[in-house]
Every structure is written in structure tokens, then in C-alpha cells.
Image (cartoon, grey):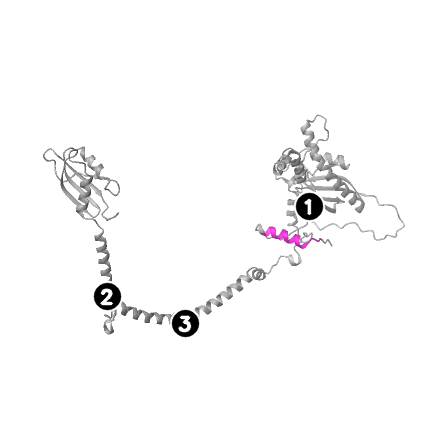
Amino acid sequence: VLACTSPIERVRNILQVARDGGIEPSIISVEGLAFANLFEEWTEPPHEGPPLAMDEDSGDTTPPTPSSAKVILNIGHRSTLMIVWSQDRLLTARTLDWGGMDVAQALSGKYSLHIVEALKELRKKGFILTSNEGATRDQTIFSDTIKGVVDDFAHELHLAILEIESDHQIHIDKGFMSGGTCQIQNLGPYLTQKLEVPFNRLKQIPAHSALNFESGGGGEVSKAIAIALAIEGLKRPRNPAVNMLRGALAKQSQTLKRFVEKWGHSLAVAGAAFLVLMVWSIMRDSFSSDMASQAYEQMKIQAKNVTGGDLKGARANARNIRKFIREQEMDAKNRKLAEKVQTITSALDVFKGLTESTPSKKNLVLDVQKLIVDNDKVEVQGFIARAPDIDVLANAWKSLSTDGKVEKFRPGFAAKGGKTPFGLRLKVNRLKGK
């Protein structure tokens, strides 16, 4: 039996984050146990572990020989996952509060960089010098800055290793690293110096030979946890996945229950609104009948007032009412027409405007033969002493044109007495006060 516990609020928060991203997860697993999928035959049932020593009163006081073990670190952005593997089985998993962000913060403080720029510098050229011989001063300072942070990590890791070796009677003789931060150059040799345990980057593992953690094009070195969690979702019942969605957080299969939980309040509001609507419909029908009767009586009273009492009794039929309405509409139309006619200037006013805008006879001699005023369209035909004066006259009348244009056209008569015939057409404003 393998039992895992976690604060329920922690699981709820993870579940809510997934739902906010449009994902309904089927499994929320444990990171440390999932990481072990990369090193075990997860398609097979779990192997039976060695028997536990139950007899504490045995006379044999010879301490058992520590078995060989290896430690695998996944050094991430903010934390490091540590698992210990021995005899093809997972012994323990720990989380260390140290990651690439700690190194970036040290570089940010040392070189006064923004944290984002510090992360870029770390990914681009992060390194540790195993020896300062031949290195420049800048390289030494950069390396020592990273070393100062890694030393804290090495100390915490050393204490964890000693504790695990004591608890499980093992001897850790190998160390492997994965994760984005493990790509700091010479991080493995430096940890080897500090811990006296050989550390190297995780390259390939027998259980998954297709994965190349050293130079994989898919970025496996920084995505080991993601790959391990994906494997957790593929496990079968004979080697089941560790799923924290249990009890109150278990995924419900009852569609109706989820529907009621999600839309129950809305359905209750909709039902109440429908009931109110039905009551209002019945009351509105009664109100409408009463209002229609009152409106009919008021219309009869108003009709008598409007017609002056002419349509009474037998005369108040549909034919006489329609005739009365037509007469009233005709009177209204005639009144509007009369008001409009009073606001229109006469043709003499138009002629006066043309005369006032025409240059003096000393400069221009013309003989008007025909003046046509049709609403806002004015047409002038006649003779002029000189042909160029036609343009002068047209320019003078542009001030009267509503669109600023005066159109020239050929009149219907020929030249006479040495004078040139002309025709001009323009639009004028016939409304008073405009």
C-alpha cells in the first residue's frame, strides 16, 4: 500500500489554476513519485521490496552492509527535486528550496541587473571555474558569484544525503542532474568537489532510450518533470498512477449533478422569473381589456371635439370619417404649401441679383434675350459684345450660385450685328433669409 497526503487547499488551488486555463485534469499527481517513472518499468506491476527486519531482539549486532544507491536531482527554476534510487526501486524523494532563481538573484545583485536580464545571462553563459588559473578577473568574479549560491545548495544537499544514508542504510556513490539549471557549465564537477560524490548530467536511461537528456532536440533536459507527469497519466491499473483527486475532489461522473451544481441557482432564478411572467400575463390581459374600453370612450369624446359635432348619429360612419380626414389632410397640405410659397423669392428678385452682380456697361456690354427661372435653376441667353467677356460674366455670377459653378452652353440662335451669342446656367437659392 502506498499512501500519499497533501493539504486539500493545495490540491484545490492547483485544480482551480488548471480550470482557469480551460483544462479539466483527470489526475493531479505527486512530483517526486512521478519523476521515478523515468527510471522504472512503469508498464509492469511494482516490484516487491525486500522484507522488513521485524526481530529487534536478535543477538546479531553486526551492522548491515550499506547498499549502493544513486541520487538524481532535477534542478528547476525555484526548487530542486531530489530522489534516491537503490536496487531498482525508489527509496525516498525530497524537495530542496533552491533553484535557478537563486543564482539569477545573486547575479542581479552583483551586477545591478533586472532579474529578467540576469536569467538571460545565466542561460546564455552561466559557468563555474573549477580552477582560477588562466581566467580573467571578470570571469573569476562571475564564477565566484555563482559559487557563493551553489555552496549554500551543496551544504543543504550534503545534510539531506547524510540523513538519507543513515535512515536507509545506504551509501550514495553516484549523482545525476537534470533540469534547466543543471546546464550551468562545470556545475557537476563543482558539486563533486564539494560533496565527494561524482555528479554528472543525466544523459540516457535504460527505461527510455529514446530520450536524450544531454542533447535532445526536444529540450528533454529542462522538461524531465513534464515528461514524467505525462507518463503518470498513461499508467494502467496494474501499476496505477498516484492521483490526489480523491474524496471531495474526486472527478464526478454524474452529468446531471454537475449540471445542477453549475446551473442550479440560474434555474431557480429562471423558474421564479417564469412564474412572475405568467402572473403578469394574466393580469396584463385584464388590464388591457379595461384600458381598451376606456380608450374607446375617450376616442368618442375626442372625435366629437375635433369634428365640432358635425359627425353625429348616422353621419358618424366610416365613409364620412374618411372623408373628414382627407379634407383635414388637404387643408394641412395647403397651409404648408402657402407657407413655403411665402418664403420663396420671385423671379424679379433673381433677375435683380443677376443685374447687381453684372459688371458695369463700360466694362461689359450684353443684350439678354431670354431669362428662364425654374425653381432654383436659372438660365440666361443673349448676346455679348466680346466672346472673352462670357468668362468674365460667368465668374461674376458664381457668387450667386449655390454650388459655386456657372455652366456655359450654346444658345438656340446665331450671332447678330457682330455680337456673340452666349448661354449661362446656374443654381440659386430661392428661399428668403438663407
Q: Position of residue 71 (x, y in %)?
A: 74, 42
Task: Indicate the amino acid at tag 2.
Answer: Phe
Q: Viewed as shown, does residue 399 lie left or right of 48?
A: left
| Foreground of the two, 252 or 194 | 194
Q: Position of residue 134 (x, y in %)?
A: 70, 25
Main SS of residues in magenta? helix
Q: Position of residue 289 (x, y in %)?
A: 38, 71
| Residue annotated with mark 3 | 286
Using a 10 Å C-alpha cutoff, classify the residue at mark 2 as few (fewer than 14 neighbours), some (14 to 19) or many (20 or more).
Answer: some
| Residue annotated with mark 2 | 324
Task: Indicate the amino acid at tag 1.
Answer: Phe
Sooner in the amino-acid sequence: mark 1 or mark 2: 1
SS at badge 2: helix
**Magenta-drawn segment:** 4-19
Residue 434 counted in the magenta span: no
SS at badge 1: helix
Quarter of the rendering containing residue 196 = top right
